[in-house]
Amino acid sequence: MVYVVTSAFSGAMMGFILYSLFRLVTSIVNFSVMSSLFLVLAIIYFARDLINFPFPVVQRQWQIPPSWVSFSQQVNMGIWGMILGAGVFTYNPFPLFLLMYLYAGIYLSPVSGILIGLTFGLARSLSSVADSFRSADYNKHNKKEASFQKIWTSSWYRILHLSGTGALILLAISKM
């Protein structure tokens, strides 16, 4: 449990860093221009997931090298939380994560960036814990796919993402 908390905390730190980066960009660019760009980007990503519109997601599809996590378990989870909390250094098929940071940087306070990073760091660390149980479940019962993996790849996850992106679009329209 301590490792999950460490990963969530370091994800929160990365959330604050990304929020600050987006806030800096927002302070340089005119507010109405930034709001309009956000709205266009959110609509494009909504269409991407709704009708499979080909538009890239900011991600690196990269795995954390073993040499980066060769410390104590708690330090490893801290490093992992920072990397996963950023959301762009590893595989992330859904752009809602970065849209949330961008929305927070334009319209919200630093606490929102921290909470987004905390939530994402926590969620990613819990998925890793579930994956370890999935591996144990696979070895124990020789199943091809454990229940967590079925949930992750199911359509409800896509619907959840579309709902979140749609909500951000409506919120952005209400702030304009």
Image: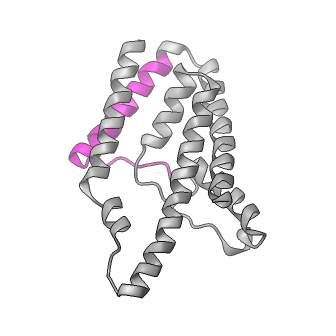
Quadrant of the snapshot with the C terminus = top left
| Furthest residue in direction front, as rendered | 1
* Horizontal and vertical percent position of residue 106: 54, 22
In percent of the image, x 75 and y 73: which residue is there?
A: 70
Magenta highlight: main SS: helix
* Horizontal and vertical percent position of residue 122: 56, 51
Image quadrant where residue 138 sits: bottom left
Q: How many marks?
A: 0
* Horizontal and vertical percent position of residue 20: 67, 30
Quadrant of the snapshot with the N terminus = bottom right
In percent of the image, x 59 and y 43: which residue is there?
A: 118
Q: Is residue 37 left or right of residue 146?
A: right
| Residue 167 shows in this picture | yes
Image quadrant where residue 40 sits: top left
Q: Is residue 159 left or right of residue 27?
A: left
* Horizontal and vertical percent position of residue 109: 60, 22
Give the extent of the magenta segment: 33-59
Q: Is residue 164 above or below residue 141?
A: above
Q: Which is nearer the eye, 21 or 13? A: 13
In percent of the image, x 59 and y 42: which residue is there?
A: 117
Q: Which is nearer the eye, 81 or 93? A: 81
| Residue 87 shows in this picture | no
Residue 1 among those drawn in magenta: no
| Furthest residue in direction right, as rendered | 71
